[in-house]
Amino acid sequence: MRTAILGAGAIGAYMGAALARGGAEVHLVARGAHLDALRANGVRVISPRGDFHVRPHATDDPRDIGPVDVVVLGFKAQHYAGCGPLLRPLLGPATAVVAAQNGIPWWYFHGVEGPLAGRRVTSVDPDGAVSRAIPVERAIGCVVYAATEIAAPGVIRHMEGTRFSIGEPDGSDSARCRDFSAAMVAGGLKCPIERDLRRDIWIKLMGNIAFNPLSALTRSTMAEICRDPIARELAETMMREALEVAARLGVETGISVERRLAGAERAGDHRTSSLHDVERGRPMELDAILTAVVELADLTGARVPALRIVNAVASRLNARLAAAAATAPLASAG
């Protein structure tokens, strides 16, 4: 299988390294010091499951790669709308795009039946920009249960989790999913093909929707939120509201809020990706994780007062982060 990892950061480079270890032809698209290290030394993975090292091709120009069988999107959902120029050189007639993202994907209502079939979720697909960049018929959904970070340029630290659930938006059993799953398993990862990937999306989202924005707003770890009675109660309320939205969309997770909170508490002093973003002055992955769920609540008539308030506050913070990030290059150049 010929695979390109577009956005070979912490998750993307980990997936790419595993695929390469399993025998797939892998091309990493990255930039900056991380790219320099990938070119010079390959990818080194540090993991409690065993360290390993591979040397796949790395570039900052997808035109060096050409069409592939599968493109894995390793960057955050807010960058999807602008990925067209990078993605186009990698697309052949049958190229699949595996979107390894958190939250509600742009394809959420693709492949479903009923009055919501084909509806666009504007929070994650503003003006249809993502659908134009990544046609929904190419999309394979992917829910990531692994925790990784870039320990140093070219070095990925894998903390826990090896599961990457995938599935077709229409729930079909496809050869392209089977082929990708087999390549991931050959590389030492778990990659179950789910006929109802939306259930996995909401299970993962139960934690993200509460802990990501709350950790960013309070600068707290997951365990710290769980230990604080008021913060814990707010997280629980947000989860329950999210489950109500999911239920109105016909999704039952089968996971209780209490079990999800217990899992978060066991994670200890884990710093969410949103907390890392805020600490580094970068905008959070808020639209897919929280804003889209408020949009879906409005669509289904679910009352979500806690989600609405936290989304409003977090959105103000995100706007300031985005403005600062946009002006940072000019400031440094002066």
Image (tube, rainbow, N blue to C red):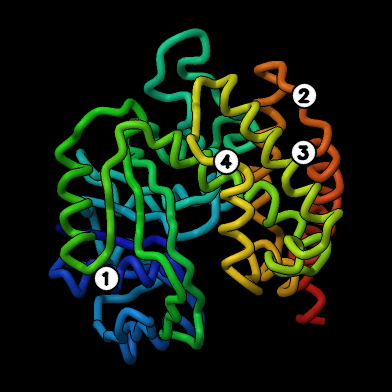
Q: Which mark is residue 303?
A: 2
Q: Which amino acid does label 1 sit on?
A: Ala
Q: Are marks 2 and 3 in contact (CB under 8 Å)?
A: no
Measured Cα–Cα span from mark 2 to mark 1: 42 Å
Mark 1 or 4: the one toward you: 4
The residue depicted at 74 percent of the width and 67 percent of the height is 278
Quadrant in which residue 76 is drawn: bottom right
Measured Cα–Cα span from mark 1 to mark 3: 37 Å
Quadrant in which residue 170 is drawn: top left
Q: Where is residue 37 in the image (x, y as percent from the top left)?
A: 40, 88
Measured Cα–Cα span from mark 3 to mark 4: 18 Å
Q: What residue type is labelled 4?
A: Ser
- Secondary structure of the residue carrying tag 3 is helix
Q: In this view, does 153 lie to the left or right of 300?
A: left
Q: Which mark is residue 256?
A: 4
> Mark 1 — residue?
18
Q: Which amino acid does label 3 sit on?
A: Leu
- Secondary structure of the residue carrying tag 1 is helix
Q: Where is residue 224 in the image (x, y as percent from the top left)?
A: 75, 68
Q: Examine the rendering and report whether any part of residue 9 can be seen.
A: no
> Mark 3 — residue?
307
Mark 1 or 3: the one toward you: 3
The residue depicted at 19 percent of the width and 74 percent of the height is 21
Q: Residues within 10 Å of mark 2 (few under 14, many from 20)?
A: some
Q: Residues within 10 Å of mark 1 (few under 14, many from 20)?
A: many
Measured Cα–Cα span from mark 2 to mark 3: 9 Å
Q: Is residue 192 left or right of residue 290?
A: left
Q: Earlier in the sequence, mark 3 or mark 4?
A: 4
Q: Examine the rendering and report whether any part of residue 18 can be seen.
A: yes
Q: Position of residue 291 (x, y in %)?
A: 70, 39
Q: Which amino acid does label 2 sit on?
A: Arg
Compare residues 37 and 140 and report the one nearer the observer: 140
